Image: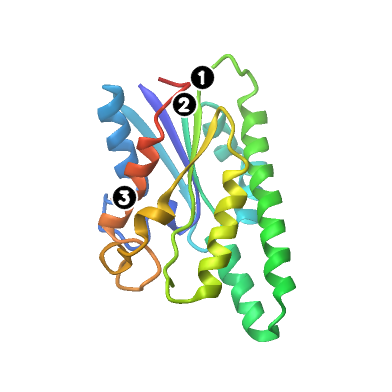
């Protein structure tokens, strides 16, 4: 049996999907099929959570820390709410530094997320993987949104290592937003979560499997 722990924002929580069709259950099913064994999942997704909120949860919540320490597979979704909050501040002040500062802070906190997990794992002889998704852009007609989502994605991709890999979700959603987003135009629908889960699965499972 494999232990799968998910932490993140509304994408981890599965907002916009039909029951049982969010990211976590769909990735769990794909993983079980690939591995040929049962996968037990724990979902610590919080709608509206920023990267800082998720980092705080991993640093302070002993239940989450305990499950994370024993996990074979970990997935993260973070950053979307950071950009949304920064965009709202930018709309008020028209100061590009707001977006630059938000990106830098988010990058640093994402790096801290990965480092926190590595410390929780402790014994590197036990194999595990960490998977994340880059951000899709629900506003493809806005040049500013395209620019900053791509900047964020480049930022988290720079953090990849032997354990941590980022799924290229942005490219998979590009041109298919109406098909893959839910009624709110922001969160994925069940099919959109399927695409994210598939992209995560396509990253493979090394060095775990």
Q: Name the residue beneath numbered marker 1.
A: 127
* Residue 156 image label: none
| Residue found at x 42% / y 33% | 4
10 Å crowding of disc 2: few (<14), some (14-19), many (20+): many
Residue 63 picture quarter? top right
Q: Is residue 132 left or right of residue 94?
A: left
- Who comes first in sequence, dot 3 or dot 2? 2
Which residue bears the numbered disc 2?
A: 72
The quadrant in which residue 30 appears is top left
Q: Nearer the viewer, residue 50 or 191?
A: 191
- Residue 139 percent coordinates (x, y): 44, 72
The answer to whether residue 60 shows anywhere in this view is no
Which residue position is annotated with label 3?
195
16 horizontally vs 47: left or right: left
Horizontal relation, residue 167 to residue 60: left or right: left
Residue under the image location 33 percent in, 37 percent down: 28
Q: CA distance from mark 2 to mark 1?
A: 7 Å
Mark 2 or mark 1: which comes first in sequence? 2
Could one spot residue 92 in this view of the protein? yes
Question: Pointers 2 and 1 in contact (CB under 8 A)?
Answer: yes
Q: Is residue 207 above or below residue 24?
A: above
- The image position of residue 75, as x and y in percent, is 47, 40
Q: How many marks?
A: 3
Q: Is residue 96 above or below residue 130?
A: below
Label 3 CA crowd tier, 10 Å (few <14, some 14–19, many 20+): many
């Amino acid at each position: 049996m494999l232990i799968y722990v998910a932490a993140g924002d509304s994408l981890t929580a599965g907002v916009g999907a039909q029951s049982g069709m969010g990211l976590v259950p769909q990735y769990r099913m794909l993983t079980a099929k690939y591995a040929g064994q049962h996968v037990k999942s724990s979902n610590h997704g919080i709608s509206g959570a920023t990267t800082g909120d998720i980092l705080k949860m991993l640093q302070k919540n002993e239940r989450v820390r305990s499950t994370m320490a024993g996990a074979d597979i970990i997935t993260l979704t973070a950053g979307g709410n950071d950009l949304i909050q920064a965009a709202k501040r930018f709309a008020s002040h028209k100061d590009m530094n707001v977006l630059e500062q938000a990106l830098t802070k988010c990058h640093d906190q994402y790096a801290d997320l990965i480092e926190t997990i590595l410390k929780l794992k402790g014994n590197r002889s036990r194999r595990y993987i960490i998977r994340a998704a880059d951000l899709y852009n629900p506003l493809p007609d806005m040049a500013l949104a395209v620019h900053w989502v791509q900047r964020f994605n480049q930022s988290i991709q720079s953090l990849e290592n032997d354990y941590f890999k980022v799924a290229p979700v942005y490219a998979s959603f590009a041109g298919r937003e109406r098909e893959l987003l839910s009624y709110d135009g922001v969160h994925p629908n069940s099919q959109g979560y399927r695409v994210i889960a598939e992209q995560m699965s396509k990253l493979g499972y090394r060095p775990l499997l």
